[in-house]
Image: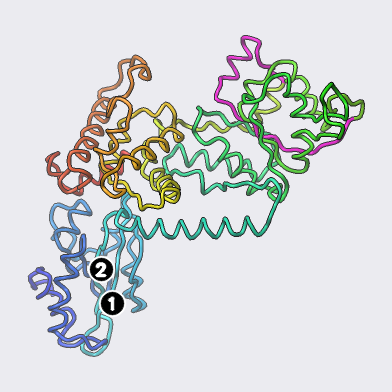
Amino acid sequence: MNDIEPGGTQYMTQLFGEKSKNGLTRELIEALFPMFEEASAGAIAVDRDARITWMNSSYSQLLGLKDPAIAIGRPVRQVIPETRMPEVVETGNPLLLDIMEHQQQQLVVTRLPFYDKAGQIEGAVAFVLYDDLQPLTPLVSKYRRLHQDLAAARKALAKKARSTRYSLGDFVGASPGALEVKRRARLAAGREMAVLLLGETGTGKEVLAQAIHSVSSRAEKPFVGVNVAAIPDNLLEAEFFGVAPGAYTGADRKHREGKFQLANGGTLFLDEVGDMPLPLQAKLLRALQEGEVEPLGSNKVASVDVRVIAATSRNLEAMIADGSFRSDLYYRLNVLEIPIPPLRERLADIGLLCETLLWEISEGLDMRAEITDAGVAALASYDWPGNIRELRNVLERALTMSEEGGVLDADAMFKVLPRAGVRPASQIAPRPIRRLAETLAEAEAQAVEEALVASRGNRTKAARLLGISRSVLYEKLAKMS
């Protein structure tokens, strides 16, 4: 079999024989195989011992092999550790659509067994249908839409008072920073402890707070949020602890519950807790320590059981140093700290964020919206001081101005980005001298991004512009993500 020319049709015809177990004729094989091979991003065949008998040049480039002949005769799992080809050979069952991860790439693969004239399994052949998941974005988006519709329907049926809108899946991201945030959030959800969320404005602190509550033991109880910065100082105490009838001129004659009472049994989310005035900090600390609140104008205390999640965009440790935030309250709130990285530190998540945000935005605009790889690369050139909230605003403006039917490319992004493609100088701190390897890596990443923008997301053209092979480009993209 090794003396057969590895040229696709002739090779596969001899592998399948005159007639396969499924009745495929030589003519049908010769007609179909070239179309499969041409439409795929790579093709490979193995024998009954799962050793590689043939591989086309596209697949060898995808695997980073200089010559397909290097792999011939080797066990397929030595070359592709994640493959399921041995399973197909052993069981005879085809795997028509499977996602295989190889060196941080996600490949959509179809694997088929083939038989000799006696009907015995002779080996298997596989085609890589997609070497990235971008072509499947419409299918993934449709699934996500159906899933979100189902979740919305369940929430409507439950009719829970003060229920949450977000789950952990709504904190979008697969970068190391985002995954660490999710890991800590799952840890927080499983334990009854105070949580402090630290992050700039627009990074998704409330989404994360609701997500923690939604998978905690208090999920069936109320989630009550209060933005400390949005309430005047003289009203904060009443907002937190409630008001007794006739407590002050103009007060309601009925008892008014505060946020602590409303959140009893559930979770109280204190957003921008760093903006709380010092006198109220002392009363909040007492309420947390004693589990009791005293409504304004009342001499009676009420027991409350709340789990507190606090969030701030300010540096509380610096505030403790200058005396504007109590250290004892800080230690009470900061049992588990979850720093949320700004968007500029997790640019690898921009593609996923765009997909999610565009689906939400396009629902309101009654139009289909998508973004090209070049458009994503253009967004990655900006510093995002407003984080995810600013990203949503940019996408909304780009869609409003779009003349391409909702398809956003690099040009569409640069039209709406502040100081197109250039990070604001005010956001860039003077850089210390770094190691040469770090400087070269950054320059290489920038060159790859510029090539993707210039080629409008076509990775084959981008590789050609950079003077490297497509497989090398994939390796560099994987390292950048």
Q: Residues within 10 Å of mark 1 (few under 14, many from 20)?
A: many
Residue type marked 1: Pro
Residue type marked 2: Ala
> In this rendering, is residue 389 above or below 53?
above
Chain part drawn in magenta: 301-328
Where residue 149 sits in the image (x, y, percent)? 52, 58
Quarter the N terminus occupies: bottom left
Quarter the C terminus occupies: top left
Give the CA separation, mark 1 to mark 2.
9 Å
**Is 421 displayed left or right of 280 in the figure?**
left
Q: Residue at x 27, y 73 (%)?
A: 49
Q: Residue at x 27, y 29 (%)?
A: 421
N-terminal of the pair, mark 1 or mark 2, is: 1
**Is 438 displayed left or right of 153 in the figure?**
left
Mark 2, residue position: 126
Mark 1, residue position: 113
Q: Nearer the viewer, residue 206 or 64?
A: 206
Where residue 51 sits in the image (x, y, percent)? 24, 68
> In this rendering, is residue 270 above or below 266?
above
Q: Which quadrant would residue 425 be assigned to in this image?
A: top left
